[in-house]
Image: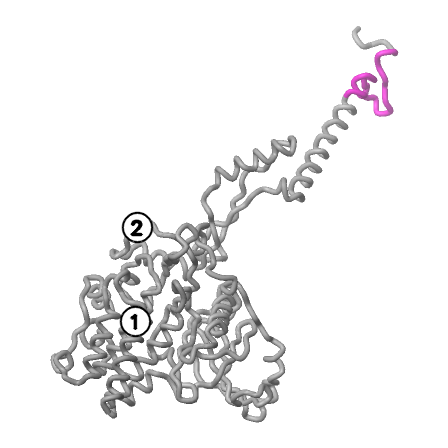
């Protein structure tokens, strides 16, 4: 009978018979299988722990950051020469050309608003942040000069107990405190502006410490430092992180001054006020081509320091970049913002590419207030209707008593208003032209007296 010989069979203790050669083969294949599994496991760990084998990943931004998903490209399973690996990596890059970034819920909402706005036009314009042809106009735009030690030496905790550190007010981006200090050898009254959390957002405190907010404060500080020679731009004493220290505006804001002048019906002072306001904006736009856009120009951004009108608050400023292929031009920008108010330019409401001319239009809105005693568009249209009117090229209503006035101040302010409210931004004059015109009218009036 087959397999019955003693040489070909082995009887174990339990009476089970195993062929000797087959048992060796089973053990061999079992060991081989375990070895292959071990190698695959080691290879997987090796590839995931080395940057050049690490799977490329990208984040898809959803409305809620907690729901973000990470999508991996297929793992690299080819182990070839360096040249082959580089070529393979380049092929993967070609397959993933689209740049994807993290977008928070607020930004997504803003983008959705723009996309569904019927005034929106698909315009091919340069993105000043990512276009390789847009370069910084100077190294100062990317610089920072913090002096944290000097701020620490103010000893604010001690001043709080001695009533030398007081809360003053809060704006859209900052909380303002008054600090009394004589150690710096300057005016003892200083203003400390601290970046504040977003109001109405539960994640506001965390949002405060995002990089973009630190960048806002850096830009504010560097612009104040660059314009420290200007009589009509606020000075800066210190800057560190989310804090800026400057002189305290003891004379209040321009908005408060306008109300007082309108009550007094002081005609000549109105002309002087607007001439100084235009000078501050002209200093911002100084140079062969403007390098700074204030971006939030209203009468509340002008303050009186020791009796001099000065422009400040550059939290929403834009540092323009130069077009390297056309060095005498600046790259245009496009800002997404729903809360424009009614003092912004038509190109902003139309979501078109923008330039420093947007600030000149905003200056015209202030001139209108001084000239007529009313906020622009307020008594004529609602916010939405005013936006549509500006896009159509319509101008705010001016009463006949002002339009036909023989008062030289009214005539000068009316002409300056029309200069600023030029619908085409390319034909809109620079702030220096408006400032020069108002200054000349002011001197003429002063000489007559």
Where is the C terminus found, in terms of image quarters? bottom left
Q: Nearer the viewer, residue 106 or 401?
A: 401
- Residue 122's disc is 2
Label 1 sits on a secondary structure element that is helix
Q: Quadrant of residue 233?
A: bottom left
Q: How is the image coloured?
A: one colour
Q: CA distance from mark 1 to mark 2?
A: 33 Å
Q: Where does the image place residue 249, in percent across and percent down from the top left? A: 43, 85
Question: Which residues lie in the magenta part?
Answer: 7-25
Which residue in the protein does label 1 denote? 433
Count of numbered tags: 2
420 left or right, relative to 197: left
Reply above or below: 307 against 323: below
Q: Quadrant of residue 400?
A: bottom left
| Mark 1 and mark 2 residues within 8 Å of each other at the beta carbon | no
314 left or right, relative to 122: right
Where is the N terminus found, in terms of image quarters? top right
């Amino acid at each position: 009978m087959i397999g019955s010989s003693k040489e070909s069979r082995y009887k174990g203790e339990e009476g089970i018979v195993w062929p000797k050669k087959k048992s060796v083969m089973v053990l061999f294949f079992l060991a081989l299988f375990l070895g292959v599994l071990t190698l695959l496991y080691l290879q997987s760990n090796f590839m995931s722990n080395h940057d050049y084998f690490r799977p490329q990943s990208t984040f898809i931004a959803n409305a809620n950051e907690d729901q973000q998903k990470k999508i991996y490209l297929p793992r690299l399973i080819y182990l070839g020469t360096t040249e082959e690996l580089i070529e393979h990596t380049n092929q993967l890059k070609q397959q993933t050309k689209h740049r994807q970034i993290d977008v928070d819920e607020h930004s997504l909402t803003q983008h959705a608003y723009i996309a569904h706005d019927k005034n929106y036009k698909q315009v091919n314009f340069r993105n000043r942040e990512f276009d390789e042809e847009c370069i910084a106009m100077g190294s100062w735009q990317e610089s920072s000069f913090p002096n944290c030690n000097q701020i620490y030496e103010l000893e604010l905790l001690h001043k709080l107990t001695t009533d030398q550190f007081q809360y003053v007010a809060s704006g859209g981006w900052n909380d303002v405190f008054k600090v009394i200090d004589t150690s710096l050898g300057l005016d003892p009254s200083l203003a400390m502006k601290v970046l504040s959390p977003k109001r109405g957002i539960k994640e506001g405190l965390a949002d405060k410490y995002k990089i973009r907010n630190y960048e806002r404060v850096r830009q504010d500080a560097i612009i104040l430092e660059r314009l420290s020679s200007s009589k009509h731009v606020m000075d800066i004493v210190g800057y560190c992180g989310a804090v800026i220290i400057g002189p305290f505006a003891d004379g209040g804001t321009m908005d408060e001054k306008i109300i007082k002048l309108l009550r007094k019906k002081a005609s000549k002072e109105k002309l002087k006020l607007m001439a100084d306001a235009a000078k501050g904006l002209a200093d911002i736009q100084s140079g062969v081509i403007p390098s700074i856009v204030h971006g939030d120009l209203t009468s509340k951004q002008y303050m009186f320091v020791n009796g001099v009108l000065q422009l400040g608050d550059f939290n929403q400023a834009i540092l323009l970049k130069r077009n390297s292929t056309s060095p005498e031009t600046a790259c245009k920008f496009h800002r997404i913002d729903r809360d424009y108010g009614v003092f912004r330019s038509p190109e902003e409401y139309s979501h078109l590419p923008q330039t420093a001319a947007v600030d000149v239009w905003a200056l015209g809105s202030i001139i209108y207030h001084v000239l007529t005693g009313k906020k622009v568009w307020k008594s004529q249209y609602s916010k939405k209707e005013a936006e549509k009117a500006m896009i159509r090229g319509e101008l705010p209503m001016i009463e006949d008593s002002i339009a036909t006035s023989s008062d030289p101040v009214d005539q000068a302010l009316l002409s300056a208003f029309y200069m600023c409210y030029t619908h085409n931004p390319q034909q809109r004059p620079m702030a220096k032209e408006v400032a020069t015109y108002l200054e000349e009218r002011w001197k003429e009036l002063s000489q007559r007296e």
